[in-house]
Image (cartoon, helix red, strand yellow):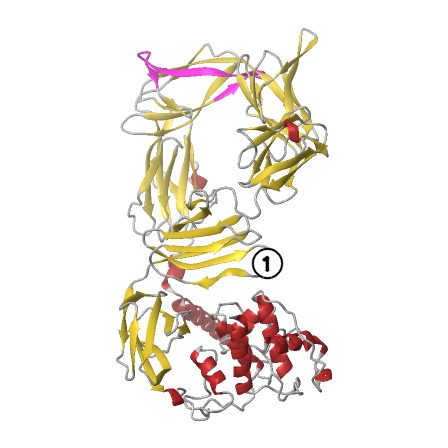
Amino acid sequence: MKARLKKLMAAALTLCLMLAMLPAGVLADGPYTVTFYKADETEAANGVYEKGTITAKSEDGEAGPFAAGTKVVLSVTTDLLYLLSSCRVEEADTGDEVSTSLSVEKGNISFTMPEGDVKVIAEFTIGQSTVVLAKTDLEHGDFNWVGSIKGVGYSQLVILDNTPDPGYGLDYYKITDSTGDVLQTRDNVFDTYGEDCTIIAKFRLVYDITTAQSDYGTISVDVQQAGENDTVNVTVTPIEGYVDSKVYCTYTKEGETVTEQLTGGSGSYTFVMPAYNVTIYAEYEPTYTVNTSAGNYGGIVTASKDSGFIRGEQAAVTIQPYYGYDLLTLTVDGEDVTDQVTWDGNGSSGRTGTYSFLMPSNDVNVVATFDRLFDSEIYRIYDSRYGYVSINVWSEALDKFVPYTLGANEGDLIQVVVAPSSGYVVNGLSIKERDSLGSSVDYWRSWGESITYCFYMPDSGVDIHVDFTEAAPEHIVYVDRAANGSLKADTTWAADGQIVYVTATPDTGYVLSSLFVKTAKGDQLKVYEAKKTGTYYFYMPDQYVTVSAYFAPAASALPFNDVAYKSWYYDAVKFVYDKGIMDGVSYYKFAPDATITRGMVVTMLWRMAGEPYEAAAGFTDVAAGRYYTTAVAWAAKNGIVEGMTATTFAPDQAITREQLASILYRYAKWLGFSGYGSDISGYTDAGKVSSYAYDAMSWAVRSGVVTGTSARVLDPQGTASRAAAAQMFMNFYNYIK
């Protein structure tokens, strides 16, 4: 016994400790109960009182008990002539009153559950005055007093419900007080204001509405019964591929079937209810499509609607040739109807034509072809929100440029004027031929003012791409004083991305050895050589820069102490160094005899191309953030290089002379140069040239890009040194110039 007692005490202690460890909110959340009491403090079991009932549920309709914070709704029903005279909600433990809210229209009382049980103390009494609801001449139906609750003062809110006899429906009703005034009602609820009142109502005959459904659609009505002369709304929803063509109402009158077509269309209909039961049914028709296409570039063809045509419906297509094009043929299911097209003006170029026909019982195919009026077209590709691009063509007759309208012919002089909007500048201009990989204008950047550029029209259309960007805040451009020469920048202030031109002029007997542009953070910027001799440019960062130069005696222009002035590769090394194509392995070392890798060569080409951005190429051995990462991606995408396998590039592998020649060969073709080569069979090791590289090597020899290691030896399998690569790149540059 003692052992059992000890176990019970231990269990109780454990429970107390567990409860003490619980967060305060756990016990405070409940759930809690609602208990009903009469005015004399006796309990009203389950909310049942002598003359009424009260039920407690959450606003979601759930019965208690309830968690703290739950909105509890007390629904009240009363016996006839009785009302809820008082209702108090209080906390069971303290007796403090809980705030309540009365909803007159819904006939209920609500409150928020506190942290504890509550008591509802209510009393039902007969009205302050004996309220009588009299009924006058209620034929074919009745009204019932559903319940009442107490309102303000001595008023009484009465809830009514009507019950028509079978085959009848409520026509109208009104409530009058003792003086005959009509009481205002809302949703069958009205206030008696403590006075007797009378209900006057009329019931009328109603008739059933039946819908006849079909496999091709559904029919719905807004009411299931209606009285004579009522307006009934009907909605028809066809299945896909069908439309509702006609909807009918049918009924039997004096032994004969009467059918009436409903008014409306496109799924919405109405009819006036007769004094008979009716059935609604619909007729459906299959729909057909007008398929349009332009057989060649030069215009567009559109149908008056893509689908939903029915047999015999008027269909139309619109033909819009582009400027510079005429309609050549228009066929409908293979039949030529070109002569039946109606145009909104003379001719068809740049105008709108229309062809109409009656829809057959099948889909229709409409095909248009267009004829170009001019040799070439110019397409402007830009965002008009940020600027405008105008095109002009030189007119020999007028001796001036005239606006570009319909097209241009090969050899026409074209003027492009780019005007940025306020707050924007020109970020880039590119003019590309549509029918070739060549480019009339290299990609370039210019800041600020409008740009005017002229070119001669090729034998194909061209795309003019223009990029605009928001003008950026400007930063100062510092230019250091230089010994043995002068250094000037074309501006003292520039914005982020703006091109800044620098002119370096050496004194007699000196040459420009190096030109540096450093940011405020100490980073060195890339400097490019402009077409004008002695002029260079760079792109301004979002911070100030310092421009400095070093002018060296002509005999020692390079900073590298391992590149002799009289060496065979001196000019080549100086060329690639000055162009920014190659750097030294250190500031004072070039390492001319070191082998050059595949990654280095691709980076040199990329620098020559202006360092265009390209996303990663997908080679597993080309990691992100390496000096050659973007270069490899750019070269691979443009077909200039290939991987050693489908997934590897081998960027650190030494490159052979034939591999280097192949890369330069593909780059030349990418630029639009011919791949014509010469006979290399005179070289003793011509047979050692790989089959894939033979055309490239013969081209490289013919173009002067590659020379033999001797008069009779090409050494195609030999690795290329850094000096040899510099020489080949200089030769290549002279070739493309």
Closer to the camera in the image, 548 or 137:
548
Query: Is residue 359 rendered to the left or right of residue 2?
Result: right
Identify the image quadrant of residue 736: bottom right
User: Residue 415: image x %, image y %?
Assistant: 44, 51
What residue range appears in magenta?
162-183
Residue found at x 35% / y 61%: 447
Question: Horizontal placement of 481 versus 597: left or right?
Answer: left
- Within 10 Å of disc 1 (Cα), the crowding (few <14, some 14-19, many 20+) is few
Of the pair 281 and 325, the residue shown nearer to us: 325
Is 667 above or below relative to 561? Answer: above
Is 445 rendered above or below residue 516?
above
Which residue is rendered at x = 33% and y = 73% of the image? 503
- Picture quarter containing residue 508? bottom left
The location of residue 639, given as percent across then percent down, is 61, 68
Q: Say which of 184 and 585 sits in front.
A: 585
Question: Which residue position is annotated with label 1?
Answer: 436
User: Which element is circle 1 on?
Assistant: loop
- The image quadrant that residue 158 belongs to is top left
Q: Amino acid at mark 1?
A: Ser
In depth, the one of 360 and 276 nearer the eye is 360
Residue ID at (62%, 12%): 276
Q: Can the viewer see residue 638 in this picture?
A: no
* Residue 64 location (% of width, % of height): 45, 47
Any magenta on residue 147?
A: no
Total number of numbered discs in the rendering: 1
Q: Please determine whether, in this image, residue 144 is positioned above or below residue 178.
A: below
Say above or below: 439 vs 600.
Answer: above
Q: Main secondary structure of the magenta part?
A: strand
User: Is residue 425 rendered to the left or right of residue 476?
Assistant: right
**Which residue corresponds to the image point at 36% horizontal and 63% vertical from the top-left?**
24
Image x and y of residue 49, in percent: 41, 35
Can residue 407 be seen?
Answer: yes
